[in-house]
Image (tube, grey):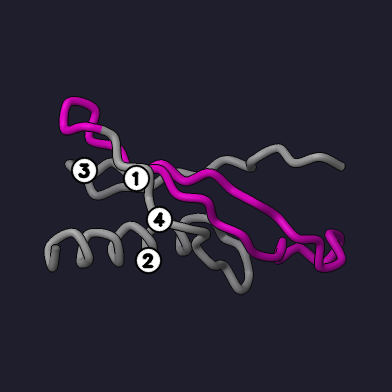
Amino acid sequence: PAAQAGADRATARACRSVSGLKDATIEGAPVRFGDTIGIDARLVRGTWPQRHMKGARATMLCLYDRRAKRAETQEWPTAR
């Protein structure tokens, strides 16, 4: 449990950082895929930092590769 808690903190930190969002927060627990794929999925919510976005909220899907310790995000489509 302690190791998983540490891993969860690491994925949350990486996903918040790579999202580029202001005031980024992680929503919920990670979706942890098996060791064959080695990916954790997280949702990141925050505010677009660009001035022209006028403080619009954003949701990003973050995939974290546990082996490479690398995260990548893409905007999560939401109803408009």
Instruction: Magenta stretch: give its range.
Output: 34-63
42 sits left or right of 59 in the view: left
Which residue sits at x=49%, y=62%? 26
Disc 1 from disc 3: Cα separation: 9 Å
Could you say whether the residue bearing mark 4 is in a helix, strand or loop? strand
Which residue sits at x=57%, y=67%? 24
Q: What kind of residue is marked 1? A: Tyr
Disc 1 from disc 4: Cα separation: 13 Å
Could you say whether the residue bearing mark 1 is in a helix, strand or loop? strand
Q: Nearer the viewer, mark 1 or mark 3?
A: 1
Neighbour class for label 3 at 10 Å: few (<14), some, many (≥20)? few
Is residue 44 magenta-colored?
yes
Q: Quadrant of the N terminus?
A: bottom left
Q: Nearer the viewer, mark 4 or mark 3?
A: 4
Q: What kind of residue is marked 3? A: Ala
The residue tagged 2 is 13
User: Does label 2 or label 4 sit earlier along the sequence?
Assistant: 2
The residue tagged 1 is 64
Q: What kind of residue is marked 4? A: Ala
